[in-house]
């Protein structure tokens, strides 16, 4: 889980409202310049003191972490000896090669490294993350807003361990916390038994082209109903008449649901460049991937009905062609036009109904 720290040093009259929101959103740390601002914070939040440009106070109060500028306050390691009950971190402003090396050294040796990159490029952060790989300390990078925080969390795939952001309004702390929780929960897939297939005529189907490579045992879940989906495999496996396209899933008819972000469903017809969908492997492991393009074209369609061990059902309508495939037990790749009653496919049978994509406990009949 990525760390979210909120900087309240310059929020002005909104300080109390920002504090209450940050605590409610369960941010990981509150950073202040005055120990008094940390005094009454609950134990659920890390209290971080950073008197930037000021001398260190004689009393750190209830601070858990004290971030220091070594040029003004002294070395964190030496301060730790003098104050063994407090954790110390190092502030580094990266503006050139020398300060970049300081940041790399801090990442390798200090418990906490608070990093401010003056230039908009993320290459220096990549270098620090790589230099600090395997170290026990944590890198906290300053972000100017939530959008930059999302980028920082993804740099070099590993991302910074955390982000410090000064909120400009109430709501920013919650948005930052949501950005840090970009993962999607793993799913419990089940074996579904095919009960019927039928040629259903022409319609529009969607190919979902993503900005990432799928693995051979990975695809996206697609279904006509929100309570039953089948795992459609990507075009990762070789085909006799065309090159592999391991970024693509020939997913299904445009009315179909797939899982997007925040555990919501999206219609295939709604997806566009920049949308997020949930990639799922045969073990139920998930990750969010970015849609690069959706191709919607008229094609003959095939309907596949299947039933789960508990009697719940799923339906998938997809392109009626041999090269369009789904995944079966053990990662077996099944050509959709060869499916027949009794065959097993992998699927997902959520229990919630859906309203505008959100799971909700209400009556809803789909057929």
Image (cartoon, rainbow, N blue to C red):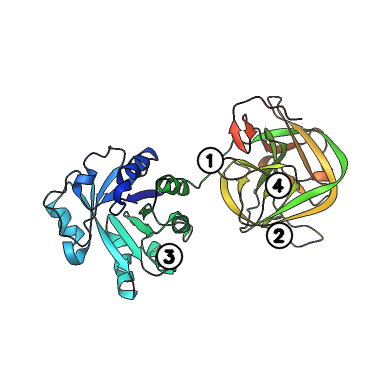
| Mark found first going from the N terminus, 1 or 2 | 1
**Residue at left offset 58%, top offset 38%:** 187
Which label sits on residue 268? 4
Asked if residue 333 shows in the view, the reply is: no
| Mark found first going from the N terminus, 1 or 4 | 1
| Mark found first going from the N terminus, 4 or 2 | 2
Q: Residues within 10 Å of mark 2 (few under 14, many from 20)?
A: some
Tell me the SS state at disc 4: helix
CA gap, disc 4 and disc 3: 35 Å
Q: Which residue is mark 2?
A: 245
Residue 309 in percent (x, y) is at: 69, 27
- Which of the two discs, 3 and 2, sits closer to the camera? 3
Q: Residues within 10 Å of mark 4 (few under 14, many from 20)?
A: many
- Which of the two discs, 1 and 2, sits closer to the camera? 1
| Mark found first going from the N terminus, 4 or 3 | 3
Residue 13 in percent (x, y) is at: 30, 48
**Residue at left offset 34%, top offset 50%:** 6
As rendered, which of 235 and 172 lies closer to the eye?
Answer: 172
Residue 342 in percent (x, y) is at: 79, 32
Q: Which residue is mark 1?
A: 185
């Amino acid at each position: 889980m990525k760390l979210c720290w909120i900087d309240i040093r310059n929020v002005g009259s909104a300080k109390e409202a920002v504090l209450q929101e940050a605590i409610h959103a369960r941010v990981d740390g509150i950073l202040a310049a005055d120990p008094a601002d940390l005094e009454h914070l609950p134990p659920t939040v890390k209290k971080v003191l950073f008197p930037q440009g000021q001398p260190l106070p004689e009393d750190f109060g209830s601070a858990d972490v004290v971030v220091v500028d070594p040029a003004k306050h002294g070395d964190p390691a030496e301060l730790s000896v003098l104050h063994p009950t407090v954790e110390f971190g190092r502030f580094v402003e990266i503006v050139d090669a020398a300060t970049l090396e300081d940041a790399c050294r801090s990442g390798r040796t200090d418990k906490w490294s608070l990093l401010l990159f003056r230039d908009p490029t993320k290459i220096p952060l990549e270098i620090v993350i790589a230099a600090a790989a395997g170290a026990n300390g944590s890198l906290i990078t300053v972000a100017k807003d939530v959008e930059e925080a999302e980028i920082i969390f993804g740099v070099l795939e590993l991302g910074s361990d955390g982000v410090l952001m000064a909120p400009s309004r109430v709501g920013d702390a919650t948005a930052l916390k949501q950005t840090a929780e970009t993962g999607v929960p793993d799913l419990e897939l089940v074996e579904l038994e095919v009960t019927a297939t039928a040629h259903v005529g022409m319609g529009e189907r969607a190919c979902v082209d993503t900005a990432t490579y799928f693995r051979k045992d990975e695809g996206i879940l697609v279904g006509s109903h929100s309570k039953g989906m089948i795992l459609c495999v990507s075009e990762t496996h070789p085909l006799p008449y065309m090159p592999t396209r391991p970024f693509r899933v020939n997913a299904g008819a445009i009315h179909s649901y797939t899982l997007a972000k925040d555990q919501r469903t999206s219609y295939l017809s709604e997806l566009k460049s920049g949308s997020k969908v949930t990639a799922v492997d045969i073990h139920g492991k998930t990750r969010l991937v970015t849609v690069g393009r959706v191709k919607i074209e008229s094609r003959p369609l095939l309907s596949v009905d299947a039933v789960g061990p508990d009697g719940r059902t799923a339906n998938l309508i997809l392109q009626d062609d041999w090269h369009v495939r789904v995944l079966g037990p053990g990662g077996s790749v099944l050509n959709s036009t060869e499916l027949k009653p009794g065959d097993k496919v992998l699927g997902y049978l959520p229990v919630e109904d859906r309203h505008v994509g959100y799971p909700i406990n209400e009556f809803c009949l789909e057929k």
